[in-house]
Amino acid sequence: MNEYAIEWTKDRDYAGVTVPSGTAWKTKLLRYAESHPEDVKVIAVNEDGSAFFHVPVAWIKCSPPRKVSEEQRVAAGERFRQMWENKKIDGIE
């Protein structure tokens, strides 16, 4: 399976989230299930590695991608490179 699904009904405070195996979302939701067991529940891990979770509806967010100009992108890249160099110098690598 290579399908994501999010579903909920008005009378529930949680959403059902289905994610494929080997995805960042699955890893993130498994981590949340460990760190927030009262909020995120693993309902099923299927034979193909996909998983089904219950997640609070308030955690579900839909937003458009952030638009940045080429200059902003270049400046952000430079800040990141500088931050990485500073970490190397401080021995935090």
Image (cartoon, rainbow, N blue to C red):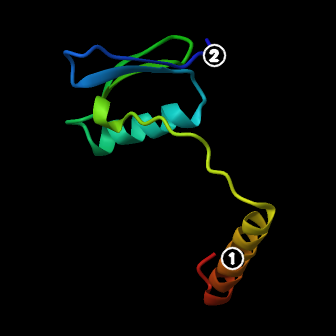
Q: Which mark is residue 79?
A: 1
Mark 1 falls on what kind of element? helix
Amino acid at dot 1:
Arg
User: Furthest residue to the bottom?
Assistant: 89
The residue located at (61%, 11%) in the rendering is 1
> For this view, does 55 lie left or right of residue 71?
left
Q: Are marks 2 and 1 in contact (CB under 8 Å)?
A: no
Residue 79 lies, in percent from the top left, at: 68, 76
- What residue is at 21 percent from the left and 25 percent from the top? 13
Corner quadrant of residue 85: bottom right
Work out whether residue 86 or residue 68 is closer to the camera in this orientation and state it.
68
Q: Quadrant of the C terminus?
A: bottom right
Q: Is residue 70 above or below residue 5?
A: below
* Left or right: where 13 falls relative to 65: left
Counting from the top left corner in percent of width and height, residue 91 is at 62, 84
Callout in the foreground (2, 1) = 1
Q: In the rendered structure, which amino acid carries the disc numbered 2?
A: Asn
Q: CA distance from mark 2 to mark 1?
A: 36 Å
Q: Which residue is mark 2?
A: 2
Answer above or below: position of 25 versus 82: above
Label 2 sits on a secondary structure element that is loop
Residue occupying the point 61% across, 44% down: 65
Question: Residue 4, position in %: x, y?
Answer: 54, 19
> Percent from the top left, x then y, of residue 39?
24, 35
Q: Earlier in the sequence, mark 2 or mark 1?
A: 2
Mark 1 surroundings within 10 Å by alpha-carbon count, few (fewer than 14), some (14 through 19), many (20 or more): few
Neighbours of disc 2 within 10 Å: few (<14), some (14-19), many (20+): few
